[in-house]
Amino acid sequence: MAATEEAKVPPKAEAQPFTPLPIASLPMRTVAFLLDCIVVTGLVMFFFAIGFGQAALRYDDPPNSALLLGAAITAAAFFPVTPLLFAFLWAWRSQSLGMMAVGVIVTTRSGYRISHTRALFRAVLWLLSIVPLCAGMFALFFDPERRALHDRLAGTVVREFR
């Protein structure tokens, strides 16, 4: 009787091999990057309006100190907000707004969603990758997985989602 009960139990299913999504092409990543730049420019304009709005309302011709204060407010608000915005979106949906528009996602090299820590790390590295004349982006042209410097250091890959 024990032998027949053992025979009824199906064998353990072996883990299915994971088939990752295809790597995103350079044109798709470029369009997503440009759309993200538009979003970031909108944020800068928003912070610029907040920073310079007070000076514009008080003076017909604002003094230099008001202009410097507005620039300081813009920079102080922009630099922490931008990486946090992208890290939040990458951890939440694996996509920034530009990536949502073109249909690409950020995953780990094995194809899984990235953690909050990895998303924040990638966001900070992304800023460092584009600040010196987009020097960190040159690896996109030579890497078979189209990984930029920030992708290599964060252990991420950008893949097509559609």
Image: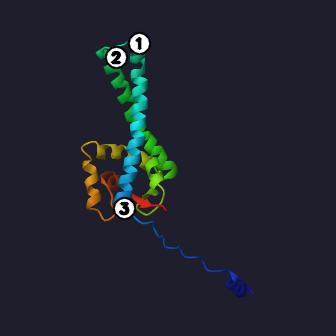
Which residue is under mark 1?
A: 58
Which residue is under mark 3?
A: 25
| Element class at badge 2 | helix
User: Compared to 5, does 97 lie above or below?
Assistant: above
Q: Position of residue 148 (x, y in %)?
A: 31, 55
Asked whether residue 114 is in view, the answer is no
Question: What's the residue type where badge 3 is placed?
Answer: Ser
Q: Position of residue 139 (x, y in %)?
A: 27, 57
What residue do we see at 70% from left, 83% from top?
8
Mark number, residue 66: 2
Measure the C-alpha gap from mark 3 to mark 1: 50 Å
Q: Are marks 3 and 2 in contact (CB under 8 Å)?
A: no
Measure the C-alpha gap from mark 2 to mark 1: 10 Å
The quarter of the picture where the N terminus appears is: bottom right
Asked whether residue 31 is in view, the answer is yes
Q: Position of residue 114 (x, y in %)?
A: 46, 54
Residue count near mark 3 (Cα–Cα under 10 Å), binned few <14, some 14–19, many ≥20: some
What residue do we see at 68% from left, 80% from top?
9
Q: Are marks 2 and 1 in contact (CB under 8 Å)?
A: yes
Left or right of 105? Residue 150 is left
Q: Give whichever of discs 3 and 1 has the lower sequence position.
A: 3
User: Compared to 88, does 4 lie above or below?
Assistant: below
Q: Give whichever of discs 2 and 1 has the lower sequence position.
A: 1
Q: Position of residue 111 (x, y in %)?
A: 45, 62
Toward the viewer: 21 or 29? 29
Residue count near mark 1 (Cα–Cα under 10 Å), binned few <14, some 14–19, many ≥20: few
Q: Residue furthest front?
A: 60
Toward the viewer: 158 or 108? 158
What residue do we see at 47% from left, 52% from top?
101
Question: What's the residue type where badge 1 is placed?
Answer: Arg
User: Compared to 111, does 52 lie above or below?
Assistant: above
Residue count near mark 2 (Cα–Cα under 10 Å), binned few <14, some 14–19, many ≥20: some
